[in-house]
Image (cartoon, helix red, strand yellow):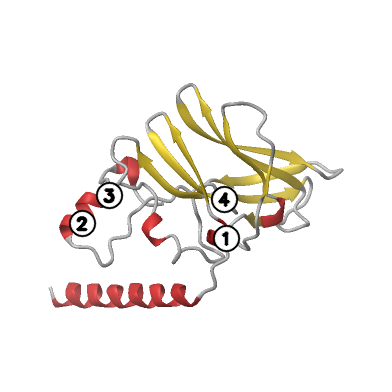
């Protein structure tokens, strides 16, 4: 029992140190440039205009609830912090043995908004600015409304003269599972408990 209490105290102390460290980091997500808001079947979606990543995602029937950690958006707005809409890639040219990792969260820069070509496309962006110049792929991201559902779509195009192998492709699903500073009642009101909504 004493060991458990000690372990909990150590974990709490580390979490406090982590938040203090994040507070000192410069915000790079471009929150000062505003937001884009959409009503889609079943949801209200709010995107950061500069990054076109999710700032808030709420059920249409309960706009107080937020699936994303939107209440900590500013604290989580520095380089290296993932948001729904980010992309992780491991790539190599065919025949090579070493994989190279790329992530849209590593070094933030304002994405280039693309023209909306149909009424079902909510937002579209060229992600080149937030990926290293040497990446051999051109990456675009689309938020769409399809068949009554909210859809996140990535389009990848090889821009090199060589074949490119994708070793891994990850779309981080960031959920609101931050309970620090909340009472038990606040925690139950502000998050869904269940295997479908675990923080990843």
The answer to the question of whether label 1 and label 3 lie on touching residues, with beta carbons closer than 8 A, is: no
Q: Which residue is mark 4?
A: 49
Disc nearer the start of the sequence (2/4): 4
Disc nearer the start of the sequence (4/1): 1
Circle 1 SS class: loop
Disc nearer the start of the sequence (2/3): 2
Decide: is 140 above or below 21.
above
Image location (x, y in percent) of residue 46? 46, 45
Spatial CA span between label 2 and label 4: 29 Å
Q: Residue 73 is drawn in which quadrant?
A: bottom left
Spatial CA span between label 4 and label 3: 25 Å
Q: Nearer the viewer, mark 1 or mark 3?
A: 1
Image location (x, y in percent) of residue 11? 30, 73
The answer to the question of whether label 4 and label 1 lie on touching residues, with beta carbons closer than 8 A, is: yes
Q: Which residue is mark 2?
A: 186
Q: Which residue is mark 3?
A: 191
Decide: is 178 above or below 39.
below
Q: Residue at x 77, y 49 (%)?
A: 136
Taking the image as shown, residue 181 lies to the left or right of residue 121, namely left
Q: Which residue, as the protein is rendered here, is positioned at the far top?
A: 147
Q: Residue 17 is drawn in which quadrant?
A: bottom left
Image location (x, y in percent) of residue 169? 59, 45
Locate the N terminus by quadrant.
Answer: bottom left
Taking the image as shown, residue 49 lies to the left or right of residue 60, namely right
Spatial CA span between label 1 and label 3: 26 Å
């Amino acid at each position: 029992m004493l060991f458990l209490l000690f372990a909990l105290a150590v974990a709490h102390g580390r979490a406090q140190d982590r938040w203090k460290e994040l507070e000192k980091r410069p915000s790079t997500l471009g929150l000062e440039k505003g937001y884009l808001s959409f009503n889609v079947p079943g949801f209200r979606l709010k995107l950061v205009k500069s990054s076109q990543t999710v700032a808030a995602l709420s059920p249409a029937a309960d706009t107080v609830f937020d699936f994303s950690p939107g209440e900590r958006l500013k604290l989580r707005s520095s380089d290296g912090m993932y948001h729904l809409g980010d992309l992780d890639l491991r790539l190599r040219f065919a025949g090579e043995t070493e994989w190279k990792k790329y992530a849209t969260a590593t070094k933030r820069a304002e994405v280039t908004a693309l023209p909306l070509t149909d009424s079902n496309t909510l937002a579209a962006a060229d992600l080149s600015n937030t990926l290293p110049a040497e990446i051999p792929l051109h990456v675009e991201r689309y938020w769409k409304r399809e068949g009554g559902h909210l859809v996140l779509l990535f389009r990848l195009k090889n821009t090199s003269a060589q074949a490119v192998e994708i070793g891994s492709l990850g779309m981080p699903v960031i959920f609101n599972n931050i309970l620090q500073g909340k009472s038990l009642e606040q925690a139950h009101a502000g998050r869904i408990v269940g295997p479908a909504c675990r923080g990843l």
